[in-house]
Amino acid sequence: MNTRHLFNLWGPTSLAVLLAASLTGPAYAQPVSEQQASEQAVVSDAAVAGAEQAADHRELPRGHFRLPEKGDIVGEYYTVTVEDQEETLIDIARRHNIGFEEIRMANPDVSLWVPGKGTEIVIPAQYILPPAPREGVVINLSELRLYYYPANNPGIVETYPVSVGRDGFATPVGITRTTIKVKDPAWAPPASMRREAAERGEPAPAIVPPGPDNPLGRHAILLAMPSYLIHGTNRPDGVGMRASRGCIRMYPEDIESLYDRLPSGTQVNLMDAPFKAGWAEDGTLFVQTYPQLEENIDDSEPLQDALARLNELVEDQVDVDEEQIKRAIADPNGRFVALYGPQAPEAAPVETPVQLEGLLEEVDLEVSTVVRIEGEA
């Protein structure tokens, strides 16, 4: 299902370094108006000011978790109560390091725009680590989340919500690496975007300079994959949904933190695992499922893929209810489902439980000058 490719390095014409003076002059209007659900959302000043408060209930920085001594699960679910009538669910999500789709799925009956003072909000800050080697950066596209395993801090994993490519602009699956880090980049919209803007009768500048209209935000980390990068955004309300033209978008405070600490040359594993399974430290087997990316549906067998992942995890013979797995796949909402162990619900007797055993055979480089980056955002 998840074929991985090794991508070529940036070519000599993919990146042009410009002197800051070359961009002096009138500021350009934002060239493209993306059609996404979050366009009309406004993130309040309170959300920005509170962005570093997501770990108030823990002693670690925002997005940091200690790797478990055994098992595959970090974090915890918790609830908060809305105190400000003007605060939106998106404001709350950002403050607690959660993305748009995550907060929506965890609170399906709560208004995105007016949750209301006194409303209890579920913060789904518990994660099964993706089924990939725990090294470098791992981005699970269906989950809309980035994981970073810092080599200089081996007991820690960091995780942040991201946006990935929307329908028609899929973020590719594969293994690449980080190359150059760029602060205050200029952005060169690709020719296709300029054509689309021209057809709509909108300004279509060749270069968008640094500033509030730049969709790359203030920090960009280039990948050894032409036209793809990890970057900030001038529309943080859309983080955590399929909203980009293929790049990985992060909240401005998250990319700023990662930018300062992520070495150039770090491996980046772009994978698509809509079904995740893992052990809790008490011996409970949990699964999480997410909506699968449309572009990968034809190449997958969800139930077979789920059973294959479960088979990888069991050392002894374990019986699970296949119907539970089917229900989790049919309702991909990111919630934890206990299949086996102390936290699993008492299951009704089944005639033919699934036998999982044997089921399937089977040097930092930082650019401080203004940089023009061509490609999608």
Image (cartoon, rainbow, N blue to C red):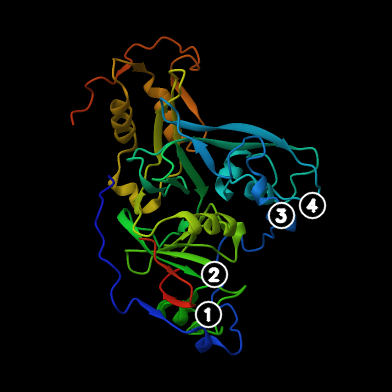
User: In the picture shown, does residue 359 fall above or below 301?
Assistant: above
**Disc 1 or 2, which lies upstream in sequence?**
1
Kindly report the distance in space between the C-alpha atoms of the residues bearing marks 4 and 3.
15 Å
141 or 110, which is in the foreground? 141
* Residue 84 in view, yes or no: yes
| Side of 368 relative to 1 (left or right) | right
For label 3, the crowd category at 10 Å Cα-Cα, with few meaning under 14, some 14 to 19 and many 20 or more, is few
| Side of 44 relative to 55 (left or right) | right
> Can you identify the residue that label 4 sits on?
86
Question: Which kind of residue does numbered mark 1 sit on?
Answer: Val
> Can you identify the residue that label 2 sits on?
215
Q: Nearer the viewer, mark 4 or mark 2?
A: 2
* Residue 37 in view, yes or no: no
Q: Quadrant of residue 102?
A: top right
Q: Residue at x 24, y 57 (%)?
A: 6
**What mark, if any, has residue 49 been given in the picture?**
3
> Can you identify the residue that label 1 sits on?
208
**Disc 3 or 1, which lies upstream in sequence?**
3
Please, what secondary structure does the residue beneath circle 2 have?
loop
Q: Nearer the viewer, mark 4 or mark 1?
A: 1
The answer to whether mark 1 and mark 2 are in CB contact below 8 A is yes
Whole-percent x, y for residue 205 in the image: 51, 85
